Amino acid sequence: MGNTSNGNKQSYSDGPLSLRTLVIAALIVALAAAIGLGSNALRSDRIPWIYERTAPSATNPIDLEQAKELFDTAEALFLDSRSREEYDAGHISGALNVDTLDPEHIDRILEQALPGIRLVTYCSGVDCHSSDLLAERLVDMGYSGIGVFFGGWPEWSAAGYPTLGSGEQPQEQQLDVNELFPPSDSGGAWGEP
């Protein structure tokens, strides 16, 4: 406590941030938190405390072994949802780069996807969620059975499986993308298969 210019003593209860104001604010925050937590505990569709990464509905999470099997049997088209720069630096051989932030780009690439070819999305591993976003977009477009490879590029490349990037020639070609999606004569939109 200090002296003011007129000689009166100043107390902690004076001023905009008095001790009493801080205690009341803390009580309000604690009460709001208790109400929110209690409300969440009583709900049937609770918000989880810890985020658990799961594949969107109508999709299937796949592991490295399943991804490699789909690659080896040419039963899937791999869709890399990372940035163009990351894709150019290295990607699963035969994968297409799909910009998840540009719905028209997705539509142009996939509007004529071959029936019977499974789509598998991947990105930069378990902390990356762009493969989930792409899978959700594909489900919205009417696709089902989308595989989401959560291990993504880091797991695939660490296993030494076929990759392409930085001007390399393919080690092994999964699918010929030009056969799947030939460019049309109408200025870059993907044509009929």
Image: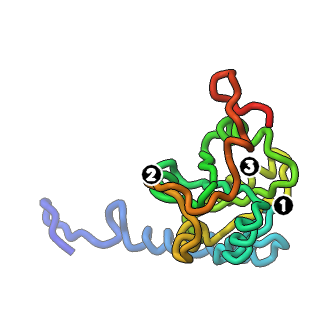
Kindly report the distance in space between the C-alpha atoms of the residues bearing marks 2 and 1: 32 Å
The residue type indicated by label 2 comes to Gly
Q: Is residue 27 visible?
A: no
> Quick check: marks 2 and 1 in contact, CB under 8 Å?
no
The residue type indicated by label 1 comes to Gly
**Disc 1 on helix, strand or loop?**
loop
Q: Residue at x 55, y 63 (%)?
A: 163
Circle 2 residues within 10 Å: few <14, some 14–19, many ≥20: few
For disc 2, the marked residue is 167
Q: Residue at x 66, y 54 (%)?
A: 79
Q: Earlier in the sequence, mark 2 or mark 3?
A: 3
**Disc 3 on helix, strand or loop?**
helix
Kindly report the distance in space between the C-alpha atoms of the residues bearing marks 3 and 1: 13 Å
- Snapshot quadrant of residue 38: bottom right
Instruction: Give x and y (percent) for residue 83.
Output: 52, 51
Instruction: Give x and y (percent) for residue 148.
Output: 71, 64
Q: Residue at x 58, y 71 (%)?
A: 161
For disc 3, the marked residue is 137
**Disc 2 on helix, strand or loop?**
loop
* The C terminus: image quadrant: top right
- Snapshot quadrant of residue 185: top right
The residue type indicated by label 3 comes to Arg
For marks 3 and 1, give the one nearer the viewer.
1
In the rendered structure, the answer to whether residue 67 lies left or right of residue 16 reads right
Q: Earlier in the sequence, mark 3 or mark 1?
A: 3
For disc 1, the marked residue is 145
